[in-house]
Image (cartoon, rainbow, N blue to C red):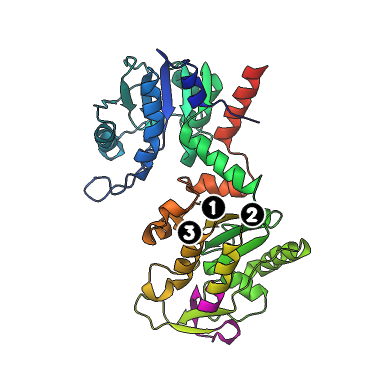
Amino acid sequence: MTMLRFSDLCAQGKARGQRVFIRADLNVPLGANGHITEDTRIRASLACIRMALDAGAAVMVTSHLGRPTEGAFKPEDSLAVVATRLSELLGCEVPLRADWLGGVDVQPGQVVLLENCRVNVGEKKNSEALARQLAALCDIFVNDAFGTAHRAEGTTYGIAQYAPMACAGPLLSAEVDAITQALAHPKRPLTAIVAGSKVSTKLTILQSLAKNVDRLIVGGGIANTFMLAAGLPIGKSLCEAALVEEARAVIDAMKARGAEVPIPTDVVTAKIFAADAPATVKAANAVEDDDLILDIGPDTARALAQQLASAGTIVWNGPVGVFEFTAFENGTRTIAQAIAASSAFSIAGGGDTLAAIAKYGIEKQVGYISTGGGAFLEMLEGKTLPAVEILQQRAAASAL
């Protein structure tokens, strides 16, 4: 199923003079002083806002920020700092409007920012009353918040049900297109890297990918559980022994398809978890009882890099070691550099993956970098995101 795209509406002149309500993801991190520490999400939302302004629309933008309590607005919940940064980046004043559910005064060619949407009562549970109030504010609803697309809330789902027209913004469209290209229509071999501390948090992703990918590279604490499943010692490393059988089932499922889960042949260990802990490289079968595995070894890193060099598509979720510690970053750095050098289409996202990409300066060498953590992971699981599903339903209904 396809979605109606805002870019198409603008190209057809259908946004001119219309009231456009954009749900963006402007949930940026704030420092102790209340200032924005990293503005990637704001910058990622600019394309949609500029598109609407250039099309001659009257533009309303909203987002959540932090975890406010519905019906109990506090100063720290305010989007005021976001409005200031948006004004700087757009080169025009972006007024902040509070108490906006009753109506918003905005003219074509203007943009206003509507205060934290998660303060509205009924937002998280997607109440019909709120959804209809939201829909009454606009002629066109645009969802450009991929980072919240896995949630069926008032401003991500409900408004899309009742707005006269509902469509996907450029960021949401690009995210869905990139993940679809990587998983539904991949150039093979398709290699997925799934790393993290626990198998339990990504078990369904691993099981889903095991049905589709040609190589499934595991890292971090997840790799320890797979090493244990392969009969290797892991000392006192982070591991979920209760999920060894599930890990073994993933290995077997891959093997039955002629695919593989490469198990580390060497690792980097320490006796304690600390940045200054002495690091020791040893064979995977030589891990001692008091060892902590904190990275893949150099031989394993080189072997995986060779596999990535021959890949057609790469999906990367998670660093393969404790890359924040210099002594244990070689595995993640080698993987990052191999992805950057590969001719494969690559998509990366979720958790610390973005931090690793930034640390090794490979932003321009990755095919697509996803801004949505939970939404990215749910698409890797093969799930249809609620916010995408409702846009597909609206598009199908309008085509009848």
- The amino acid type of the residue labelled 1 equals Ser
* Residue 356 falls in image quadrant: bottom left
The numbered dot on residue 364 is none
Name the side, left or right, on which 324 lies relative to 76: right
Cα separation, mark 1 vs mark 2, equals 21 Å
Dot placed on the residue nearer the N-terminal end, 1 or 2: 2
Q: The residue tagged with tag 1: helix, strand or loop?
A: strand
Name the side, left or right, on which 248 lies relative to 137: right
Residue located at (65% from left, 18% from top): 399
- Give the image location of residue 330, x and y in percent: 44, 72
Q: Is residue 129 visible?
A: no
Q: The residue tagged with tag 3: helix, strand or loop?
A: helix
Q: Inspect the magenta stretch and tell me whether residue 287 lies in it.
A: yes
Q: Is residue 133 visible?
A: yes
Residue located at (50% from left, 49% from top): 367
The residue that label 3 is drawn on is 340
- Give the image location of residue 391, x and y in percent: 57, 28
Q: Which residues are magenta?
A: 283-301
The residue that label 2 is drawn on is 204
Name the side, left or right, on which 201 lies relative to 399: left
Dot placed on the residue nearer the N-terminal end, 3 or 2: 2
Q: Residues within 10 Å of mark 2 (few under 14, many from 20)?
A: some
- The amino acid type of the residue labelled 3 equals Ala
Q: Is residue 328 above or below residue 74?
A: below
Residue located at (40% from left, 26% from top): 51
Question: Which of the two residues, 16 or 237, is positioned nearer the viewer here?
Answer: 16
The numbered dot on residue 346 is 1
Q: The residue tagged with tag 2: helix, strand or loop?
A: helix
